[in-house]
Image: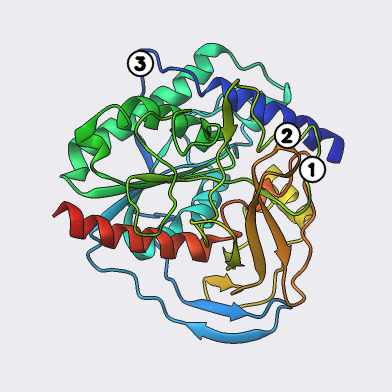
Amino acid sequence: MRSKLRLLTLATVASACLLAGPGAAGVSAKTVWLCKPGKPSNPCAVGFHTTNFSPTGKRLSISNIPGKKRPRYDCFYVYPTVSDQKTAAANLDIDPELRSIALYQAARYGSDCRVYAPVYRQITLAGITGQATATEADRQRAYNDVRAAWRTYLRKYNKGRGVMVVGHSQGTFVLRNLVANEIDPKPKVRRRLISAVLLGGNVLVKKGSDRGGDFKHIRACRSPDQVGCVVAFSTFGAQPPAAAIFGRSNEAGQEVLCTNPAALGGGSAKLTPVQPTEPFAPGTTIAAVIALVGVPDPAASTPWRAFPDSYRGRCSSAGGSNVLRIDPLGGAPTLTPSPDAGWGLHLVDANIALGNLVGLVRHQAERWLITHR
């Protein structure tokens, strides 16, 4: 299993990087929505009651977080590589792994925003491990699907509302392209951006700068009061090895961006992991890989589990990599890199600080509403 997943690691990033190039014209299918307000069987429409645990897994309390009846901003989510379909590129079926990843990574933001998440014909796990051969046309089609969904969202649903975009892994590589081409150079669209949460996807900036790599105008978020900016990081529990896939750039004069969502101005701060109590789609490849990380799994009767202040995070540039280094606090478990040290804790990027991220985006949205209305 580990040798197979190590190949998956290398191929995931190589394949996803190809999605970061300029988007060409192409035909896209009519958008299929994984998450959309009012959609039946919406994996992003869940309750938000949460059981809080100590770092060691002791049950502390239950929090009732009522979702907004009339959210005043939107979230646009692009999921990572999860498809277990056997072809190189996925079709538009909403498979169990898609529903699970939307629940794990996007649904929590729905306590405050309307979540829109398109299905796209991503490069599958089979495609990135060489079990099937992905073509340039496949990769372009994946981007075109997301671009078409974004344009449909703006045309039919946005109506001038603020929007944050969020992605992870292959989703972030696609969004790097989308933001660079569809948001950053367009002032009217850029004005609607609350923030971009681009995790586990090596967002680039000029060395020593908060912009100038992937984006010309959109800066890194360095204050909770800042809007129209980017939050980006890849998680490691130890010093990344020289061959680490995340946190390093081969582009001359550029470096990978790291912003600590709990301390945007710099330094270290406590992180609050949040995750659903529902198991990730049983029998899928991603479920097997998640199990190797050692994320705690205490029983809870609520839809969510939170572990307040269980880890401390800080952006580190040691050894030439820019990553979010985390350390366990108060007896929290030390998480295991999966499938190897070069991957780091990629599989927990979206949840290790989800409590902090949701709170940050909520604050940014409030600031956006004050300054843009």
Identify which residue, 263 or 101, lies in the foreground: 263
Badge 3 is on which residue? 27
Which label's residue is closer to the chain start, 2 or 3?
Answer: 2
Badge 1 is on which residue? 339
Identify which residue, 134 or 358, lies in the foreground: 358
**Quadrant of res 250:** top right
Per the image, label 3 sits on a secondary structure element best described as: loop
Q: Which mark is residue 328?
A: none
Neighbour tally class for label 2: few under 14, some 14-19, many 20 plus, Cα within 10 Å: many
Which label's residue is closer to the chain start, 2 or 1?
Answer: 2
Would you place residue 123 above or below residue 157 in this image? above
Q: Amino acid at mark 2?
A: Thr
Neighbour tally class for label 3: few under 14, some 14-19, many 20 plus, Cα within 10 Å: few
| Quarter that holds the N terminus | top right
Whether residue 133 appears in this view of the structure is yes
Across and down, in percent, residue 31 comes to 34, 32
Would you place residue 256 above or below residue 290 in this image? above
- Farthest front residue in view: 208
Quote the CA–CA distance across marks 3 and 1: 36 Å
Instruction: Report the label total.
Output: 3
Across and down, in percent, residue 219 comes to 40, 40
Identify which residue, 76 or 315, lies in the foreground: 315
Quote the CA–CA distance across marks 2 and 1: 7 Å
- Farthest left residue in view: 373
Mark 2–mark 1 CB contact (< 8 Å): yes
Would you place residue 339 above or below residue 255 in this image? below
Badge 2 is on which residue? 9
Q: Amino acid at mark 3?
A: Val
